Image (cartoon, grey):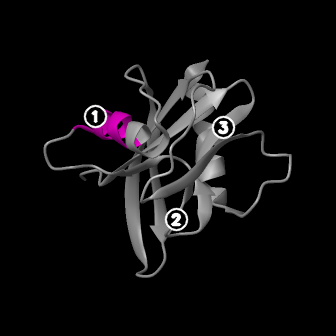
Amino acid sequence: MPLPAALVALWHGDELLLVFDRYRHRWELPGGGIEPEETPRQAAVRELREESGYEMADLVLAGRARFVLQAPRRVEDAAIFAGRAEPAGVFTPNAEIAAITWWDGIRPIDGRVQILDLMLGRLARAALR
């Protein structure tokens, strides 16, 4: 079964990089659709760069996730990649992403968080060990 999407769990210590999606109004992992000419890894690298400004070519394939999306309800598969990075630079908001943050999962954060993405991020972290 082809993979339509790739997500990236980028870690700095105990903090996970999240992006705030302007359309879904929530914090989530960077990622998105895989273009016809791309591999899942190429899509993950591109989406991470486009959504957060981080350029990471050495992402580790952490696995594949299958989940049910709503509106319209459908089952989707995604390649999950993981990596480590240092917080760097100044993020420039764009048409899709309003902000980025490194989140420890504990301190309060403004806005809703996509819980599925947090769980995928935590599971993907095991691939970095």
Label 3 sits on residue: 16
Viewer-closest of 52 and 29: 52
Q: In this picture, which residue range is highlighted in magenta?
A: 39-47
111 vs 58: above or below: below
Q: Position of residue 74 (x, y in %)?
A: 39, 74
Q: Nearer the viewer, mark 2 or mark 3?
A: 2
Circle 2 sits in a helix, a strand or a loop, which is it?
loop
For marks 2 and 3, give the CA distance: 19 Å
**Does label 1 or label 2 sit earlier along the sequence?**
2
Q: Nearer the viewer, mark 1 or mark 2?
A: 2
**Which residue is depicted at the point 13% across and 43% down?**
37
Label 1 sits on residue: 42
Viewer-closest of 50 and 8: 50
Q: Residue 55's image quarter?
A: top left
Q: Position of residue 31 (x, y in %)?
A: 43, 48
In this rendering, position of residue 109 left or right of residue 128: right
Q: Position of residue 70 (x, y in %)?
A: 49, 77
117 vs 73: above or below: above
Three-letter amino acid code at disc 3?
Answer: Leu
